[in-house]
Image: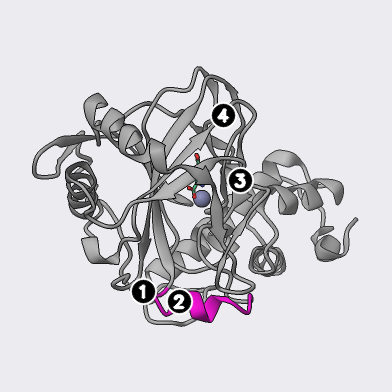
Amino acid sequence: MSSQSRSASASATTLRQPVTPELRAWIIEQAEAGFTGPVVLQSMLDAGWDEAVAVHAMETVLTDALRDKTQPGSAGAAAPKTAQRPIPEPDLSQSPARIDVGDREVEVLMSLHAPRVVLFGNLLSPEECDALIAAAEPRMARSLTVATRTGGEEVNDDRTSDGMFFQRGENDVVARLEARIAQLVRWPVENGEGLQVLHYRPGAEYKPHYDYFDPEEPGTPTILRRGGQRVATLVIYLNDPEQGGGTTFPDVQLEVAPRRGNAVFFSYDRPHPGTRSLHGGAPVIRGEKWIATKWLREREFR
Ligand code: PD2
Ligand code: ZN
């Protein structure tokens, strides 16, 4: 058994058995140390836990911990006692099938709470998707990612796509899309980074990662000067890859199929693996994949 799972060896009996305080503390400790859900689960399985019992315990503890974060007054709070700040969030309180974003009705296709993930349909028309690709295509170059070690940008082998950035409001389609996103997730246009367009060819992928900037990296304070942390992402699909190219959330074994005009939204209220916002772009197997990504910051991004 690996060192991070040493204390998980208590025996489990029934699925409905209450989770002991020791087990609760251990699961939270693992999550806070950055171990992903599947890794912690494997440690429990290695220690002899029944899979259904282990999954139930992890779900209970992590759901409670997230709820405690969003409802600071509740008992047994496991999260740091910091003031809750608002983050982008669509209004799904009345379980709408569609959300009016001014010039369009966006469909709500799926929603998950931990991690916070919402799948939208009809954010863009087919013509708008084509227009974005056409405007981006002449400016595509091998993708760079923000280098948290230095605060600059670097080619990243985990991302084998080509990309470019639009300025905020750079053309009509970009401005329209940004206004829709602002209404949809109730977050100021000014807090958004410029829209990024990525193009994946067969075999290209974006390995699982977090979109927030790692607070432990030395370059992060420099990056945060422009608008603070990233708090949410919208990945917008501009075409239909023939096979592969889904957006994956490995902690919850969720895969979103890329469909032209749809968008997957996910948010992370703190720069921490406990948000379970680990996600990746699965390899494109056949065809190609075009997406636009909108990252939302805490404050105005300039
Ligand atoms: O292409 C994707 O599905 C994808 C996956 C993970 C895009 C991003 N991250 C991103 O642009 O951050
Ligand atoms: Zn990402």
Mark 2 → mark 1, Cα distance in angstroms: 6 Å
SS state under label 2:
helix
Q: What residue is disc 3 on?
A: 159
Q: Earlier in the sequence, mark 2 or mark 3?
A: 3
Residue annotated with mark 2: 224
Quadrant of the image occupied by residue 31: bottom right
Q: Earlier in the sequence, mark 3 or mark 4?
A: 3
**Observer able to see residue 109:** no
User: Which is in the foreground here, disc 2 or disc 4?
Assistant: 4
| Direction from residue 302 to residue 113 in the image, left or right | right
Relative depth, front residue between 10 and 219: 219
- Is residue 198 shown to the viewer in this render? yes
Neighbor class of circle 2 (other Cα within 10 Å; few <14, some 14-19, many 20+) is some
In front: 196, or 262? 196
Q: Position of residue 162 (x, y in %)?
A: 52, 41
Check mark 1 vs ligand 1: CB closer than 8 Å? yes or no: no
| Element class at badge 4 | loop
Q: How far apart in space, not on screen, are marks 1 and 4 (Cα)?
A: 32 Å
83 vs 8: above or below: below
How many numbered marks have been drawn onto this rendered protein structure? 4
Q: What residue did someone put label 4 on?
A: 201
Q: CA distance from mark 2 to mark 3?
A: 22 Å
* Secondary structure of the residue carrying numbered label 1: loop
Within 10 Å of disc 4 (Cα), the crowding (few <14, some 14-19, many 20+) is some
Which residue is under mark 1?
227
